[in-house]
Amino acid sequence: MNYYEKCTLCPRSCGADRTKITGFCGQSDKLYAARASLHMWEEPCISGESGSGTVFFTGCNLGCVYCQNREIADGHIGFEITAERLAEIFLEQQSRGANNINLVTPTHYVPHIIRALDTVRGRALKIPVLYNCGGYESVKTLKMLEGYVDIYLPDFKYMDSEIAKRYSNAADYPETAKKAIAEMVRQTGECAFDENGIMQKGTLVRHLVLPSYIENSEKVIEYLYNTYGGSIYMSIMNQYTPMPYVENYPEINRAVTDEEYNEVIDFAVDLGVENAFVQEGGAVSESFIPLFDGEGIVK
């Protein structure tokens, strides 16, 4: 079966024949990636001291107006590779000492990824496979990944459909993300860590606090805690960086204030959340955005 001929891999279900045209994600049936490197700035249980073996894929099924990786999300930057080359990249990341294989924005390439993993996983590849996504996932596609993914690292961006529509053109995001995360937790079960505190399996849900939308953040945290308790981990992030293209959205055209972030953290603590990562410091500067120059992709 060619999943790209009438693509329904993501909840957009655009139905594009990606063998002939590009889908909503901006991609054809060819596999494109922009960078493969050791990433040191993920959560401590993901990066550790050795780093996370990130593979940044080109394209995205969300297209958030505030995206920091827009140059690859829009599909403008990337290098064509085969599934066979992707498998090699996984092994190269492992040989560099990566704690895991971190698939960044992988949704629209799931068939390629499965093909690559079929050749190495459980044999040459010994480290966990991590699926790093925006939370806007199809349960049907996630089920294809059962047995391939050890750790899910989704965002849960919005509990408010109006906010989701305004910034990601996805009014169905809240309900879609709920179903997706439920499937992720079903597959991975309770979180497990090795003797060094590095995550080996489980689901870690990220939430980026947006300026002006503290109530949305509190609703996300409340939902996750009431639904999953301590069986998942959360990462509550304050690294929102206003990019030049949010000028037309004045309410988010600034960094999150310390007061806003602290209010969200206080809410989580009062709720009883214990399994969570928090951040110190303010907005992340553009210099922390990786260079999508083909490092680790092109031989």
Image (spheres, rainbow, N blue to C red):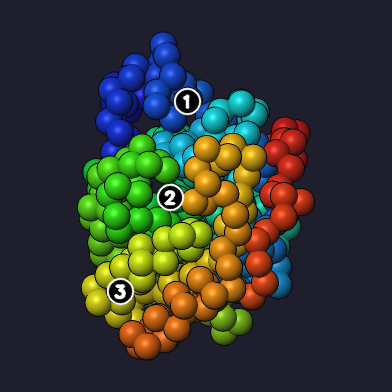
**Disc 3 to disc 1, how far (Cα)?**
34 Å
* Residue at far top of view: 20
* Residue at far front of view: 250
Amino acid at the residue labelled 2: Gly
Residue 218 at x, y = what percent? Answer: 36, 71
Task: Please say whether residue 148 is visible from this viewpoint.
Answer: no
Relative placement, left or right, of 24 versus 180 is right
- The disc, 3 or 2, on the residue closer to the chain's N-terminal end is 2
Amino acid at the residue labelled 1: Gly
Q: Identify the image quadrant of the C terminus.
A: top right
Where does label 3 land, which residue?
222
Task: Please say whether residue 169 is visible from this viewpoint.
Answer: yes
Residue at coordinates 30% horizontally, 47% vertically from top-left?
A: 162
Q: Quadrant of residue 254?
A: bottom right
Where does label 1 land, which residue?
26
Question: In terms of depth relative to the viewer, which is nearer, 149 or 95?
Answer: 149
Residue 73 at x, y = what percent? Answer: 54, 36
Where does label 2 land, which residue?
134
Amino acid at the residue labelled 3: Glu
Question: In terms of depth relative to the viewer, which is nearer, 7 or 60?
Answer: 60
Question: In terms of depth relative to the viewer, which is nearer, 196 or 171?
Answer: 171
Relative placement, left or right, of 136 versus 286 is left
Relative placement, left or right, of 134 versus 56 is left
Residue 90 at x, y = what percent? Answer: 60, 48
Determine crowd level at label 2: few under 14, some 14-19, many 20+ residues with C-alpha closer than 10 A. Answer: many
